[in-house]
Amino acid sequence: MDTAAASLFPPAAAKPRGVLSPLHVSRSGLVPRQRSLLAVRCAHFSAPPPPPPLPRADSDDAAAKAHPRLRLRLLAEEFRALPSDADRARRLLSLAAALPRLPEPDRAQGNRVMGCVARVWLVARCNAATGWRMRFAADSDSDLSRGYCACLVAALDGAKPEDVLAVDPADPDLAPLGAGITAARSRASTWHNVLVGMQKRARTAIAAREGRHPGKPFPSLVIARDGAVRAQGSYAEAQAMFLSPDESKISGLVNTLKEKKIGVVAHFYMDPEVQGILTAAKKQWPHIQISDSLIMADSAVKMAEAGCDYITVLGVDFMSENVRSILDQEGFNKVVVYRMSSEPIGCSLADAASSCEYTHFLREASRCYPSLHVIYINTSLETKAHAHELVPTITCTSSNVVPTILQAFAQIPDLNVWYGPDSYMGANIADLFQRMATMADEEIAKIHPDHNRKSISSLLPRLHYYQGGNCMVHDMFGHEVVGKIKEQYCDAFLTAHFEVPGEMFSLAMEAKRRAMGVVGSTQNILDFIKDHLMRALDRNVDDHLQFVLGTESGMITSIVAAVQELFDLYSSQERANIEVEIVFPVSSDAISKTSNGSHHVGSSMATNLDNLTIVPGVSSGEGCSIHGGCASCPYMKMNTLGSLLKICHQLPDKNNKLSVYQANRFNFKTPLGKSVAEVGCEPILHMRHFQETKRLPHKLVHQVVHGSGDEPL
């Protein structure tokens, strides 16, 4: 560190130039001796002179030993006491004026705090020379953001690393500092993000003090402004290999698709080689769609309308079944649908919904009046049909499950909702509603206009979810991964699929509160990354955006393509050095815990340690280790480029050689004698109605309230 930078970190024994106003003890505890609690260290204060300094935290003065949490709460009380938002903003500006400027060498990209509207820099030092106390300095090119930095530096500079970590960014007592200033609302995330950055540096300091070396970082891909991709780690290198596919393979596939009028729908979790070629081929043949499972079926209908005679589905079997049934419902019976393997392409989650345990879960629901079954769309059509005959059923996706359930509770009095089969998503929904029950009515109304704290609290006992179904990929985002994210990536943007375990969900929800995270579907994750990149491109200043990918690593091809497309879109402007880094948080734990039964809010989730399932290895020798592989679905990897080319080249199938590859058309009956295809599609149609109108269809409400008879006229 140079001389100028070192001047910001005086030796531990030195007196600071002013941090906080002195405090005295009254009957109510520590209170301010004068109106202002804060005066930031500054070499050249202008009139009026600063208040007397508060002794450093490592001195003998009792007031100095006040915990940083107390210091921040006193600051919050000061801001809360100011009469208006304008007064609070002016107070921030006065603090900003007193904060020393960082030397230019310290205003470097490596010291940037991610997630702030303005540029913010944070520098920390903690070693034997500082008495193992944290010495902080910060700066910003925004005066309001500098004011937030001043608050945190004043309260935490000189504190022990453990005391810095003990400050909760979500502490409601600190709300006036974090989000209580309307005039500075666009800058308010600075307060949270700088605090999280300070805590990350405190963890590093503790590790250094204890002689522990930080573990290897997760593998990642970095996309530069010119579109170039840089891989970091062997797993990332394996992903990057297929981002620039062979042109001859692309042209060969495109020619075949055009000649034979073949449409292709593929899931985000495809093998990177297949995705790379399909992404490039889409530029020449529009009837290729890579998306989540819901959009796949919709895209197939559009392809059939455009004249495609065949649809190839790259996904698991329930996806091809859904495509087949939706095409039939729309009148495209002659369009043939092909899957990519002659063997079953399973799914651990879909399999759970077809088990005897899940049938028991539904029978329990059928005995509880009135009940609605909300089933994840990632299940087979046969499962949907059998479920709908037991309990009125509507499908959902990870992006619409919360509004679906909230609308159901609002629309049907005294309703019981039974969600399945994903136990993690069910637990996360319950967690989310419990959080909502502590929110203000105004905040809840923004999520759903017909709910408030009273209604959310009343629905909690009537929300039930199945406990025995997990996605083997998302099961890997557990304790080990979460611990490493907290330690090394807590200041990065965090994305998480709604199917991840509770620890990862809570971490992402905390990040979401400070505009640094998203929890939702694969499409939600992609949109989140694109949105933050567009903001950075609009600012057009040097930046490094780091995103932790909390879902299957197959998404990387679509993410890279979207990032490169945005870079191209902004290519005409003066080019700031902006990079996007995608981090793969993969686990070394190859064991997936499973359990059976149902669960309702308020009871604890049991764990059956005797019932363990070994996660199958994935293709291409990726293995299942901390270097990568567990964030990759082995079933999705059964959809190979070879299978796609084999099917396409043999079309039209005049000799019926491809019959084993055709998606199932359900011509058989349900236990009540109805068509499986017809009954299984009805929950999907209910969901489509909800998406269009934001209300449950009248027919479904009648089935819930009066039974499964015909809808009244």
Image: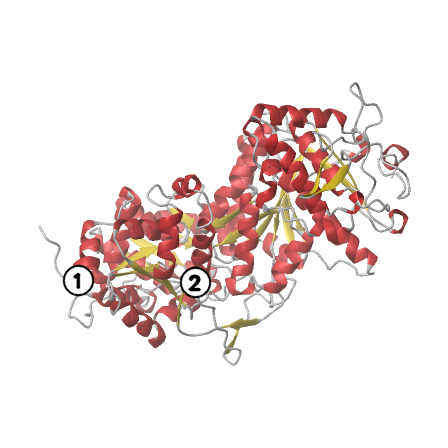
Residue drawn at 84 percent across, 51 percent down: 132
Looking at the rendering, which quadrant does residue 305 occupy? top left
Front-most of residues 362 and 22 = 22
Residue type at tag 2: Ser
Give the image location of residue 121, x and y in percent.
72, 36
- Please indicate whether residue 447 sits to the left or right of residue 562 in the image: left
> Real-space Cα distance between discs 1 and 2?
45 Å
Residue at the disc numbered 1: 707
Q: How many marks?
A: 2
Give the image location of residue 116, x and y in percent.
62, 36
Q: Nearer the viewer, mark 1 or mark 2?
A: 1
Farthest-out residue, front: 27
Farthest-out residue, bottom: 610
Q: Secondary structure at mark 1?
A: loop
Give the image location of residue 24, x and y in percent.
75, 39
Residue drawn at 64 percent across, 41 percent down: 193
**Residue 652 seen in render:** no
Residue drawn at 66 percent across, 46 percent down: 196
Residue type at tag 1: Gly
Whether residue 442 is situated above or below residue 164 in the rendered picture = above
Front-most of residues 199 and 377 = 199
Residue at the disc numbered 2: 643
Q: How is the image coloured?
A: secondary structure
Looking at the rendering, which quadrant does residue 172 occupy? top right
Farthest-out residue, left: 713
Q: Secondary structure at mark 2?
A: helix
Whether residue 319 is situated above or below residue 276 in the rendered picture = below
**Residue 94 seen in render:** yes
In the rendered image, which quarter contains the N terminus?
Answer: top right
Whether residue 337 is situated above or below residue 112 in the rendered picture = below
Front-most of residues 296 and 175 = 175
